[in-house]
């Protein structure tokens, strides 16, 4: 049987696009950049994913959802492999993913991931996703999920999440 | 037990027990943001322990799950150092415990980037991104409290006095660590101690705190001889798996 692997892969990616991050449901797992590979093994299809943070509680759910959507579409034998290296970085978030985050009220990561060792370093200037003011301040490096920091807008007073550069 | 399995379990148990300790702050933090910081760090540590338990299970080859290793061993089989099992105390004590541990953890994982085990290198690479945040957070709080009010400074000094005796164990290798360092799986703790001392000196200096003399040090945790506090954490942590075996969330 000759299978057109390229178009087959395209179809699989289109299905994966429908799997969302359960904690940030506006983002697909492709937007997040956590799908690292799709490959056809001898008797099964293998999807390779990587966690954003090691303790990310969404990973098990994402694995279940990947299997479910592929099995619904006649890919019966699916294995989901989790790898840790290379370690996920916000540099892998897609541009459309960043736009979706902003529209959802979460400030997307700004700039490239850099070292976090500097003590009391100036926090990045992040525009408020509500009123767009840059007059904001970081409240805490740790936010509602492992991947986010907490900010506050000093103009419109709204607290907001920032998807931190990582 | 194979020494490489013991070594990985030691790393995993450190992360698991400190993660469990920090999770006790959930809903009790001094302010909401710091409550979330501590539970975020807890989540990172538990996540790291999960990867390490998987690796230990693979190396052991007995088909145990990470839950078996995390929840179904008895106290003397846990190989975490005594520092991480110490009770939370007040916020200052939690901060000092975290800082002593983060400074060790950061440099330990930096060195593990060169381990001869590919999966351990991958875990180190991933974990370091998270540990870097932890170390920055605990360092900033040591400075803020040490150089803060009379009360905050006093509390940090008391915390240092009560925890200092547990720091020596971090750098006193036991048999499986000596073997891991020799084989290339693990690290040379003497080198880590130098980097740790530099880190502590730097931050204590900024915080206006004095680094105690080395003095007499407690040890035993890495070989299963724990303080009485471990039993209480295990009772809490293992209750669900022992009462309802095989439960998943």
Image (cartoon, coloured by chain):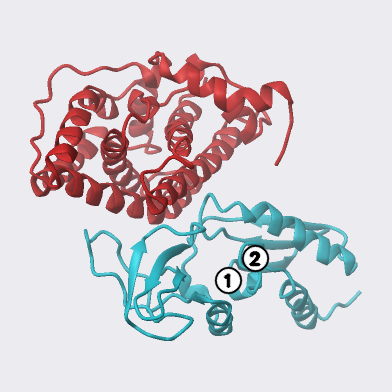
User: Do the CB atoms of the residues marked 2 and 1 lie less than 8 Å apart?
Assistant: yes
Q: CA distance from mark 2 to mark 1?
A: 8 Å
Q: In the figure, what tint was chain A given?
A: cyan
Q: Quadrant of residue B199?
A: top left
Lower sequence index among marks 2 and 1? 2
Looking at the image, can residue B119 be seen? yes
Query: In this rendering, which labeled residue sits more in front, label 2 or label 1?
Result: 2
Residue in view at x 47 percent, y 80 percent: A129
Name the one closer to the observer, B178 or B165.
Answer: B165
Identify the residue position indicated by label 2 in the image. Answer: A21
Q: Which chain is red?
A: B
Chain letter for the residue marked with disc 2 in the picture: A
Q: Residues within 10 Å of mark 1 (few under 14, many from 20)?
A: many
Name the disc covering residue B89, or none: none
Residue A77 picture location, percent across and down: 84, 58
Name the one closer to the observer, A54 or B149.
Answer: B149
Residue in view at x 42 percent, y 44 percent: B116
């Amino acid at each position: 049987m000759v299978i057109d692997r390229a178009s087959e892969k395209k179809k699989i990616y289109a299905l994966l696009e429908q799997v969302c991050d359960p904690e940030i449901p506006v983002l697909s797992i492709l937007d997040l950049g956590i799908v690292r590979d799709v490959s056809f093994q001898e008797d099964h299809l293998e999807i390779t994913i990587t966690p954003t943070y090691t303790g990310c509680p969404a990973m098990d759910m994402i694995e279940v959802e990947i299997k479910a959507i592929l099995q619904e579409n006649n890919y019966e034998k699916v294995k989901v492999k989790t790898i840790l290296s290379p370690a996920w970085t916000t540099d892998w978030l897609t541009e459309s993913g960043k736009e979706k985050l902003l529209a959802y009220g979460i400030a997307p990561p700004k700039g490239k991931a850099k070292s976090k060792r500097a003590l009391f370093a100036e926090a990045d200037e992040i525009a408020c996703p509500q009123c767009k003011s840059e007059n904001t301040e970081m409240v805490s490096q740790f936010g509602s999920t492992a991947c986010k920091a907490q900010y506050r807008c000093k103009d419109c007073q709204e607290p907001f999440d920032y998807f931190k550069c990582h | 037990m194979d020494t490489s399995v013991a070594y990985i379990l030691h790393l995993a148990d450190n992360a698991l027990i400190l993660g469990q300790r920090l999770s006790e702050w959930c809903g009790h933090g001094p302010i909401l943001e710091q409550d979330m910081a501590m539970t975020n760090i807890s989540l990172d540590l538990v996540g790291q322990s999960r990867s390490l338990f998987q690796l230990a299970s693979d190396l052991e080859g007995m088909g145990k799950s990470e839950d078996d290793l995390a929840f179904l061993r008895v106290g003397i089989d846990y190989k975490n150092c005594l520092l991480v099992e110490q009770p939370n105390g007040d916020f200052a004590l939690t901060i000092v415990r975290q800082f002593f541990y983060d400074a060790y953890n950061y440099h330990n994982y930096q060195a593990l980037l060169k381990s001869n085990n590919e999966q351990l290198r991958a875990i180190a690479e991933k974990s370091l991104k998270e540990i870097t945040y932890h170390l920055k957070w605990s360092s900033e709080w040591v400075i803020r409290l040490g150089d803060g009010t009379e009360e905050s400074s006093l509390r940090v000094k008391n915390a240092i006095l009560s925890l200092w005796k547990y720091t020596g164990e971090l750098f006193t290798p036991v048999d499986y660590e000596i073997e891991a360092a020799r084989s290339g799986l693990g690290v040379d703790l003497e080198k880590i101690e130098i980097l740790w001392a530099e880190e502590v000196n730097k931050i204590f200096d900024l915080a206006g705190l004095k680094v105690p003399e080395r003095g007499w040090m407690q040890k035993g945790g890495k070989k299963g001889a724990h303080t009485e506090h471990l039993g209480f954490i295990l009772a809490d942590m293992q209750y669900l798996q022992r009462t309802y075996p095989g439960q998943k969330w």
